[in-house]
Image: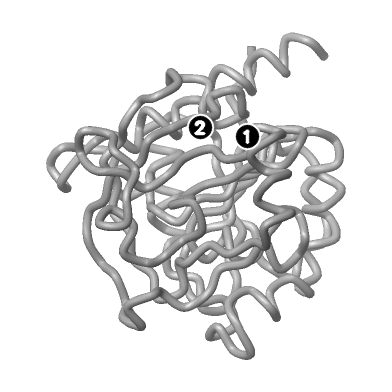
Amino acid sequence: MSRIRAGVISFPGSNGDHDALYALEHDLNLDVRQIDYRETTLDGLDTVVLPGGFAYGDALRCGAIARFAPVMGSLRAFADEGKPVLGICNGFQVLCEAHLLSGALLRNRTMKFHCSWTHLRFEQVNTSWTTGLAHGDILRLPVAHGEGCFYIDHRGLADLEREGQVVARYCTPEGDVNEVANPNGSVASIAAICNQRRNVVGLMPHPERATNDLIGGSDGMRLLGGILNSTLVAQESR
């Protein structure tokens, strides 16, 4: 069986691309390559990650320009084929702007940049990235964002809840979901969502920066490692 082939898209202003490349290659042992935003094909890849950073300097609003990058047409086709896509922080913002995920990411309620460790309670484990988790699992992951407040209107939220598209919520270390554990003010404390098909996931915290206890924690491996199960199954079915 061939090694899983992953791509990490690098936009002008990305700064989490090298973290993602390192985590996927060295921690998960995937065959990884960096994808320039000007590329127009994702042929040969099993999964794609949109990393954190400040794509195009976050001009206009986060992800608003990146959605028009040449590579995004291929990414949409890639997702439409049911292949796994993960957007981390700025990558989540880009996926929302490109309408590959619902909602939008707004300025934090505090109007400050947040850079700290947080806890997430996972509620949807039937996605390409969360197959290694169980419902109710709590992971400790770092955040680094100024626009991490997930917003969606009441009807959209009802749709997400009904379809099981809320992947994770901010919570206390004990798993309680409340406003204290949700400093950026996200609607319903949402930290991660997926599309209806469950192959596209976006989350604000950074699992790729939590893959080793030497750097503060390794819970990110439990999330990223889920791609091993789902992608290998997909390879076997071809």
Vertical relation: 119 (above or below) 115: above
Between residue 227 and residue 120, name the one nearer to us: 120
Sequence-earlier tag: 1 or 2? 1
Q: Which mark is residue 30?
A: 2
Q: Which residue is mark 1?
A: 5
Going by the numbered disc 2, the residue's amino acid type is Leu
**Residue 203 on image: x %, y %:** 50, 50
Label 2: few (<14), some (14–19) or many (≥20) C-alpha neighbours in 10 Å: some
**Residue 227 on image: x %, y %:** 55, 28
Q: Secondary structure beneath disc 2?
A: loop
Q: Quadrant of the N terminus?
A: top right
Quadrant in the rendering for residue 81: top right
Look at 63% across and 39% down and name the residue there.
Answer: 161
Q: Quadrant of the C terminus?
A: top right
Look at 75% across and 54% down and name the residue there.
Answer: 100
Position of 51 with respect to 9 (left or right) is left
Look at 45% across and 39% down and name the residue there.
Answer: 24
Residue at the far bottom: name it: 60
Label 1: few (<14), some (14–19) or many (≥20) C-alpha neighbours in 10 Å: some
Position of 27 with respect to 235 (left or right) is left
**Residue 23 on image: x %, y %:** 39, 42
Going by the numbered disc 1, the residue's amino acid type is Arg
Question: Can residue 128 be spotted in the picture?
Answer: yes
Q: Secondary structure beneath disc 1?
A: strand
The reply to whether discs 1 and 2 touch (Cβ–Cβ < 8 Å) is yes
Vertical relation: 20 (above or below) 97: above
Between residue 44 and residue 222, name the one nearer to us: 222
Position of 48 with respect to 216 (left or right) is right
